[in-house]
Image: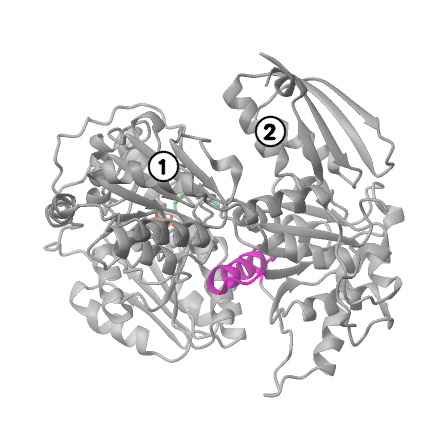
């Protein structure tokens, strides 16, 4: 048996279609059906036509009870849109998102969402058509080295050159995407492999002996008594312990286990941008977002704490810009992650565990309770409550101009953490992260690590396919939404009730903020006041029956209410104060103590004046 | 410090590129690299030497172990010293 060999069939349940003859394309669609894929996102083209035809026939032959298609194929304006729709679907549902694209330009347009999903650990399976095996390497029409390109940015990429391995490969792609630390898996399928005549097996995956052995070791690893004892010995010595929760809490479905741990031991929780929703932000012990644009109270609490428990968080540079000065008073740092490579990668830790987060938290909770550990944190709780009160988020409430923070607050008064919110990238993204309530996981879809402008609209579309009855709102920027503006039409084509908000500050606000701070206000290429786009008419042209521009503060409440109450797709452009900034801000190279809090959030120390130092972090 | 790593790799399309690409992307400079067949035709052995400190070495080992078609990563000198 070689490495490509199939796993021995361990089950005696025969697939009802086992032994049936199918084309490679039909095999792909059958695996998707067996995996429970309910929607596909993709754009057609020559090298993927057999698969598209097989999807068409599958849907014709398997109508749902309600008459709908079993596996509707959602067509974007651009493959990047399909990738972010699949990612939005995956983020909102926890299931694997699936995109199918053609070779060459179709596949290269998919690179950004694949890299974005890798960086945020989002499970995707991307099927790419490829030129025929005989033509690979000949500079054929619409040929691109997908295996090389995607290999550098996906969790894994398969180039299927042996048709007999196709079924096992596509099935394995799902296992890889969702297991361990999730991520995107690309399957590159030459056209002749799609057209090959194959016998359907109905089960079997690739061996991948190395990956599976490592995965098993991680999944089976459990916290021993000595580990628990060491953890609680440190926790019981701590006076100001803090939980720093990241996207791993969402990916692992660990928010209930985290809640139980906090109920048992009373540690306050701050969350990363990816961790929002992992812990109810309205809880008295919630400190909301930390980091570069974290709340002042979260960042001060990080500065004050003497014990850190990092859960599925990786000390990235937006949180620990200066690792040595992150949590400088912490005498003990504990870290739990599913990925061994994240332990101590940025900052040395005193205690760690590599394994599934839910089990680790449940074990710690049970062990601590059984041993009667009850940290006495009344003074720390009082300190945290005071930080939240004194350094609360705030802004210029008297301004005649519409403040973006007020827009988010107005929307939040209706949604209260129950809507799914996606964003573009920039100031509006940070305002949304700061001013919305986050009460449950998978309600916050944002491009965290890559920070990809253009993410918001297609991600909202994907999320609406995952949750047809939920309110899905894209909070976008005037520049970000331009990147995938073609997807406005996708919203109306599929009659999705997505709500799109553009916080229009006439340009790349976040870029201008950095230019104000670090480039003496020289707004190179970030001002769009000469641009001619009429967003409302653009939305109307794409079929939005409700499309309005809000320009007056006093109309804010009523307009937001009407916008959210509209049953169908709705588009709201808000002309906001173009000078509104994102505060607090921990500048690049600065410590949390040097955070700038702006004019409306009290700081507890005079911040260091930002110099004209060139930015290398943006 | 000079380190020699021994990597067992599944002979898949693009597997060698992914190992080399990982080192390049993370800024580790490979000094020497040999690829040899093993008794299993589906598996090859990469022997690779590079200069790095201990902290970087730990990361390289962990990151290399995340590549799906890597079967095993060994650092024979460290194993001997241990
Ligand atoms: C694809 C992409 N290109 C460039 C950037 C760099 N960038 C970050 S924020 C930003 C400005 C975003 O402007 P807008 O969407 O209007 O948001 P605002 O900051 O104004 O709220 C830019 C250009 C990026 N993050 N993504
Ligand atoms: Mg803008």
Q: Nearer the viewer, residue B74 or A53?
A: B74
Residue under the image location 31 percent in, 55 percent down: A432
Q: Which of A203 and A187 is in front in this view?
A: A203
Image-quadrant location for residue A511 = top left
Residue labelled with disc 1: A230
Residue A145 appears left or right of A120: right
Q: What element carries label 1?
A: helix
Residue A391 appears left or right of A204: left
Residue A27 appears left or right of A197: left
Res. A15 in view:
yes
Q: Main secondary structure of the magenta part?
A: helix
Q: What is the chain letter for disc 2? A: B
Q: How many numbered discs?
A: 2
Residue found at the far top of this picture: B1
The part of the chain drawn in magenta is A77-96
Residue labelled with disc 2: B61
Q: Is residue A88 magenta?
A: yes
Image-quadrant location for residue A498 = bottom left
Is the residue under label 2 in contact with that under label 1 (CB below 8 Å)?
no
Q: Residue A80 carries which label?
A: none
Q: How far apart are marks 1 and 2 (CA)?
A: 27 Å
Q: Is mark 2 on a helix, strand or loop?
A: helix
Q: Is residue A604 magenta?
A: no
Image-quadrant location for residue A301 = top left
Expressed as whole percent of the image width and height from the top left, the position of residue B73 reads 67, 30
Instruction: Estimate how packed mark 1 is, as few (under 14), some (14 to 19) or many (20 or more) residues with alpha carbons within 10 Å.
Output: few
Q: Nearer the viewer, residue A246 or A78?
A: A246
């Amino acid at each position: 048996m070689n490495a490509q060999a199939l796993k021995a069939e361990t089950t005696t349940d025969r697939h009802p279609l086992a032994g049936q003859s199918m084309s490679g394309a039909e095999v792909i669609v059958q695996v998707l059906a067996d995996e429970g894929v309910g929607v596909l996102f993709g754009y057609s083209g020559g090298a993927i036509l057999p698969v598209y035809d097989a999807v068409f026939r599958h849907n014709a032959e398997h109508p749902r009870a309600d008459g709908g298609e079993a596996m509707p194929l959602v067509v974007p304006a651009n493959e990047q849109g399909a990738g972010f729709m699949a990612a939005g679907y995956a983020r909102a549902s926890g299931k694997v998102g699936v995109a199918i694209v053609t070779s060459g330009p179709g596949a290269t347009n998919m690179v950004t969402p694949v890299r974005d999903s890798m960086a945020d650990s989002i499970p995707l399976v991307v099927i790419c058509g490829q030129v025929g095996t005989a033509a690979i390497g000949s500079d054929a029409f619409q040929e691109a080295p997908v295996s090389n390109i995607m290999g550098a940015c996906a969790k894994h990429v398969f180039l299927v050159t042996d048709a007999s391995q196709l079924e096992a490969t596509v099935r394995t792609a799902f296992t890889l995407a969702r297991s361990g630390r999730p991520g995107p898996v690309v399957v590159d399928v030459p056209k002749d492999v799609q057209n090959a005549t194959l016998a359907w097996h109905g089960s079997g995956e690739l061996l991948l002996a190395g990956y599976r052995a490592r995965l098993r070791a991680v999944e089976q690893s459990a916290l021993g008594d000595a580990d628990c004892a060491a953890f609680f010995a440190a926790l019981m010595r701590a006076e100001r312990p803090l939980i720093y929760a990241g996207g791993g809490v969402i990916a692992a479905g660990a928010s209930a286990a985290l809640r139980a741990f906090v109920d048992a031991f009373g540690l306050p929780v701050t969350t990363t941008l990816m961790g929002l929703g992992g812990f109810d932000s309205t809880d008295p012990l919630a400190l909301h977002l930390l980091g570069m644009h974290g709340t002042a109270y979260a960042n001060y609490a990080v500065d004050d704490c003497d014990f850190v428990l990092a859960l599925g968080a990786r000390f990235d540079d937006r949180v620990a810009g200066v690792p040595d000065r992150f949590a400088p008073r912490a005498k003990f740092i504990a870290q739990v992650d599913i990925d061994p490579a994240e332990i101590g990668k940025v900052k040395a830790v005193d205690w760690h565990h590599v394994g599934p987060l839910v089990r680790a938290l449940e074990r710690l909770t049970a062990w601590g309770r059984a041993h009667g550990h009850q940290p006495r944190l009344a003074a720390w709780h009082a300190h945290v409550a005071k930080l939240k009160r004194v350094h609360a988020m705030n802004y210029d409430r008297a301004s005649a101009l519409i403040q973006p923070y007020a827009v988010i607050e107005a929307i939040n008064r209706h949604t209260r953490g129950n809507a799914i919110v996606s964003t573009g990238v920039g100031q509006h993204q940070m305002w949304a992260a700061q001013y919305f309530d986050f009460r449950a996981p998978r309600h916050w879809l944002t491009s965290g690590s890559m920070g990809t402008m253009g993410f918001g609209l297609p991600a909202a579309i994907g999320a609406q396919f995952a949750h047809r009855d939920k309110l899905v709102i894209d909070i976008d920027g005037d520049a970000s939404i331009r990147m995938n503006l073609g997807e406005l039409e996708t919203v109306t084509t599929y009659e999705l009730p997505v709500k799109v908000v553009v916080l229009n500050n006439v340009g790349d606000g976040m870029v201008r903020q950095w230019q104000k701070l670090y480039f003496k206000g020289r707004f190179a290429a970030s001002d769009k006041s000469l641009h001619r786009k009429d967003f409302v008419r653009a939305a109307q042209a794409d079929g939005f029956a409700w499309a309005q521009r809000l320009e007056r503060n006093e109309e804010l409440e009523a307009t937001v209410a009407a916008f959210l109450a509209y049953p169908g797709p709705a588009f709201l452009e808000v002309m906001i104060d173009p000078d509104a900034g994102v505060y607090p801000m921990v500048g690049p190279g600065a410590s949390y103590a040097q955070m700038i809090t702006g004019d409306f959030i009290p700081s507890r120390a005079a911040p260091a004046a930002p110099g004209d130092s060139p930015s290398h972090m943006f | 410090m000079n380190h020699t790593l021994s990597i067992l790799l599944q002979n898949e399309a693009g597997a060698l590129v992914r190992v080399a690409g990982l080192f390049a992307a993370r800024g580790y400079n490979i000094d020497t690299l040999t690829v040899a067949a093993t008794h299993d035709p589906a598996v090859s052995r990469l022997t690779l030497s590079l200069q790095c400190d201990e902290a970087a070495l730990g990361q390289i080992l962990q990151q290399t172990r995340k590549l799906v078609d890597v079967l095993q990563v060994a650092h024979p000198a460290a194993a001997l010293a241990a």
